[in-house]
């Protein structure tokens, strides 16, 4: 103890001075960038001069509920008793969850433990299924990709990036799309200062997306490339991703849960998982549930994307056409009944018109997700201005 105490006190003294300088540097940039108090290194797990911080200390973005059965679930614990088992299981994937933080660190490490040992799928890489994805905000205020955490086993540890030039920056770390995580830590040198990120300048409430495997992120090469994440960066908005692979079926039980949230916009993008008959049967009841709690919140109804081989395969073309026709009828009913805050996004060109936007005619590549983001951006910007 005699040898440890002076060094520990010196570290705390240096950290205090660094924290003061850090706050001055951040606050001096802009009042909108006012920083929060630095997280005490004493709360970290220190190994070999790296301080490991549980990301819950920084605030996990993208969770609509705090009363979850596990730390990174996307639905509340009570949902296990109300939604179908498949929806519940998929809700335990961390799709759309991210953490924003501010640091002056010259390097950033990460450690994450996955809930499943299945790291990849036959049409989606491990970096998207089970990896982490790191972005940094540039001086212009734009987000730029910086590093990806490549999973190799169920528990992974990696230095995501090093040799970062001197300076204080905001970062955003996305969690896996098609796997769950038991714990996630960010690692920094013990001399670096770590803070929660300031509130988003836009002040927007979350955009809630309810949809299918495409909404969940299939088949993005990394978590930051799903359209919901891209739109979050472009629009400076938090996003709640309620995409359930093969199970985004416009179900009343899920609608009841969504109604509990306080969103800026609700996006219903379930047509890839339901036929025309289900569109007719479920759209009205789902909208009724949402309107009881959110009478004026913009709700965007989205057509299914075109299968990229539907120009030749008639059955797929008919599948697109019939579900879209059914949704158009339901949209017209809603408008006729006086709903002025329901809107419509056509699906024909969501992925482009050249057939190059998917892995398997259905699930987007990164190119497809960018194109889809562009289409959604045009539809969402006017709705966000209403809020």
Image (cartoon, rainbow, N blue to C red):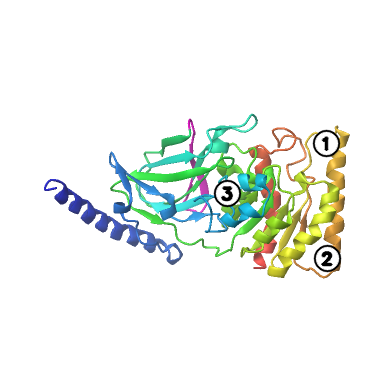
Instruction: Give the CA distance from mark 2 to mark 3.
Output: 31 Å
Look at the numbered discs 2 and 1 and tell me whether their residues touch, using CB distance below 8 Å: no
For disc 2, the marked residue is 335
Q: Secondary structure at mark 2?
A: helix
Quarter of the image for residue 311 reads top right
Side of 273 where 197 appears, left or right: left
Instruction: Give the CA distance from mark 1 to mark 3.
Output: 30 Å
What number is the disc on residue 36? none
Residue 322 screen position, x and y as percent: 87, 46
Side of 125 where 164 appears, left or right: left
Q: Secondary structure at mark 3?
A: loop
Side of 6 where 359 appears, left or right: right
Is residue 244 in sight in this rendering?
A: no
**Does label 2 or label 1 sit earlier along the sequence?**
1
User: What stretch of residues is rendered in magenta?
Assistant: 135-153
Q: For residue 143: magenta?
A: yes
**Does label 1 or label 3 sit earlier along the sequence?**
3
Q: Secondary structure at mark 1?
A: loop
Residue 354 screen position, x and y as percent: 76, 36
The C terminus - image quarter: bottom right
Instruction: Give the CA distance from mark 2 to mark 1.
Output: 30 Å
Is residue 330 in sight in this rendering?
A: yes
For disc 1, the marked residue is 310
Residue 178 screen position, x and y as percent: 59, 40
What residue is at 18 percent from the left and 54 percent from the top?
A: 9
Graded by Cα atoms within 10 Å as few (under 14), some (14 to 19) or many (20 or more), the crowding at tag 1 reads some
Residue 226 screen position, x and y as percent: 62, 44
For disc 3, the marked residue is 96
What residue is at 73 percent from the left and 67 percent from the top?
A: 291
Q: Is residue 100 above or below residue 296?
A: above
Q: Nearer the viewer, residue 142 or 45?
A: 45
**Does label 2 or label 3 sit earlier along the sequence?**
3
């Amino acid at each position: 103890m005699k040898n440890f105490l002076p060094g520990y006190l010196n570290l705390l003294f240096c950290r205090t001075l660094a924290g003061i300088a850090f706050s001055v540097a951040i606050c001096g940039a802009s009042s909108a960038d006012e920083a929060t108090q630095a997280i005490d290194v004493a709360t970290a797990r220190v190994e070999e001069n790296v301080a490991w911080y549980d990301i819950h200390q920084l605030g996990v973005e993208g969770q609509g509920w705090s009363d979850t059965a596990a730390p990174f679930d996307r639905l509340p614990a009570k949902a296990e008793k109300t939604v179908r088992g498949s929806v519940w299981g998929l809700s335990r994937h961390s799709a759309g969850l991210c953490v924003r933080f501010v640091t002056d660190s010259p390097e950033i490490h990460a450690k994450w433990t996955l809930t499943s040992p299945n790291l990849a799928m036959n049409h989606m890489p491990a970096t998207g299924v089970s990896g982490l994805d790191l972005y940094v905000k540039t001086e212009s205020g734009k987000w730029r990709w910086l590093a990806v955490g490549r999973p190799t086993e169920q528990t992974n540890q990696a230095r995501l990036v090093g040799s970062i030039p001197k300076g204080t920056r905001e970062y955003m770390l996305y969690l896996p799309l098609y796997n769950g995580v038991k714990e996630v830590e960010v690692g920094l040198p013990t001399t670096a200062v770590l803070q929660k990120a300031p509130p988003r300048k836009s002040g927007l409430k979350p955009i809630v997306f309810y949809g299918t495997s495409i909404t969940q992120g299939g088949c993005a090469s990394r978590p930051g490339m799903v359209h919901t994440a891209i739109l979050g960066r472009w629009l400076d908005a938090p996003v709640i991703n309620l995409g359930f692979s093969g199970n985004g079926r416009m179900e009343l039980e899920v609608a009841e849960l969504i109604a509990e949230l306080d969103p800026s916009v609700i996006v219903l993008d379930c047509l890839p998982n339901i036929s025309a008959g289900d569109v007719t049967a479920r759209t009205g009841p789902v909208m009724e549930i949402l309107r009881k709690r959110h009478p004026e919140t913009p709700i965007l109804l989205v057509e299914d994307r075109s299968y990229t081989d539907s120009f030749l395969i008639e059955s797929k073309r008919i599948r697109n056409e019939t579900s879209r026709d059914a949704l158009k009828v339901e949209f017209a009913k809603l408008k006729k009944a006086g709903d002025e805050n329901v809107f419509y996004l056509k699906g024909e060109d969501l992925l482009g018109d050249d057939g190059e936007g998917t892995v398997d005619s259905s699930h987007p590549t990164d190119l497809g997700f960018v194109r889809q983001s562009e289409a959604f951006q045009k539809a969402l910007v006017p709705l966000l201005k209403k809020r």
